[in-house]
Image: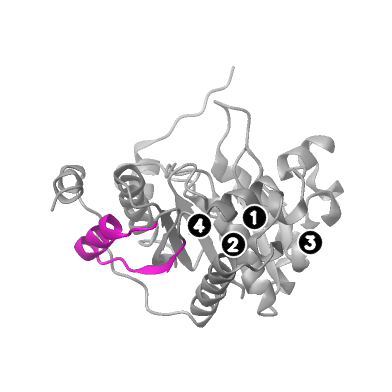
Amino acid sequence: METSTISPSDIKRSRPDGEGSVQVQMDPSIKIGTAKVFAIYGKGGIGKSTTSSNLSVAFSKMGKRVLQIGCDPKHDSTFTLTKKLMPTVIDALEAVDFHAEELRLEDFVFKGYNGVMCVEAGGPPAGTGCGGYVVGQTVKLLKEHHLLEDTDVVIFDVLGDVVCGGFAAPLQHADRALIITANDFDSIFAMNRIVQAIGAKAKNYNVRLGGVIANRSDATDQIDKFNAATGLKTMAHFPMLDEIRRSRLSKSTLFELEATPAVKAVQDEYMRLAAKLWIGGDPLPAVAMKDRDIFDLLGFD
């Protein structure tokens, strides 16, 4: 049986992209192009898919052509846009015995609410393969089918708080990385790890920190402490609102709900966020904290 080994020279070459680690490298021939590309990260269960989908709709209501790419084996990122779980890129490739040239665009790209184009990358079986490979194959297919040429905004919705070389792969394509967090220690601890990952990728790629989205939180005092200590900024704030939870249960985006005062306020916040992201701004030169320092910083007056 053949085995593959990683030589010391391979490790040395990869160290600038994450000190001491072997990272998944992007094929320079599959760059996305002229679209504005955002990668959404955050602790598992923090509301990344809900946020990504509503942000996609906000961009689409600005008249932008939007593509949302879910990067989670759970493949439910676009659930509220398409109203059901869609086949993944991995499903589509398996159906043609991984002969990618046999795939049609409609096999893995689906139109969602308000024209948002939806792709679920999926993932390899548990304990096998690499999420970075799946992301790379997805972008390659989209480029080969010329979909990226007709797109203004691409949003990567990325699995949990995993920042290994594989699931950090969307950072290699993104212009800005956005971090979703709640006003609690675990979410902020995960955010700090993601700041570290973005800093590692920024050494070799164009991605930079775009800002923080406070989610499922009425207060933001802990987030504010962390931001002040690291150089981050909060770009949008979404409260603990039951309508947000119920929108996902009803397979809907917030923009499809009755515009009560509370819902309208959240819709307006998404529109403001999309407008700010489209205009762009200077990247944040944030520096991650040491783990022990986060314990000392948070939760105390």
Please name the residue shown 53% across and 64% down the image. 38
The part of the image, by quadrant, that contains residue 43 is top left
- Write down the region rendered in magenta: 218-238
Disc 1 from disc 3: Cα separation: 15 Å
Quarter-of-image position of residue 126: top right
Q: Is residue 97 magenta?
A: no
Q: Residues within 10 Å of mark 1 (few under 14, many from 20)?
A: many
Residue to which mark 2 is pinned = 155
Residue at the spot of label 4 = 40
Q: Secondary structure at mark 4?
A: strand
CB contact under 8 Å: marks 1 and 2: yes
Q: Is residue 134 visible?
A: yes
Q: Earlier in the sequence, mark 1 or mark 2?
A: 1
- Left or right: residue 299 versus residue 199 is left
Label 2: which secondary element: strand
How crowded is the residue under tag 3: few (<14 C-alpha within 10 Å), some, or many (20+)? some
Q: Earlier in the sequence, mark 2 or mark 3?
A: 3
Instruction: Give me the C-alpha separation between circle 4 and circle 1.
Output: 10 Å
Q: Position of residue 286 (x, y in %)?
A: 28, 64
| Pointer 1 residue | 69
Foreground residue among 8 and 155: 155
Q: CA distance from mark 3 to mark 4?
A: 24 Å
Mark seen at residue 145? 3
Residue type beneath disc 3: His
Rendering quarter of residue 109: bottom right
Task: Please say whether residue 230 is one of the residues in the magenta stretch.
Answer: yes
The answer to whether residue 31 is seen in the rendering is no
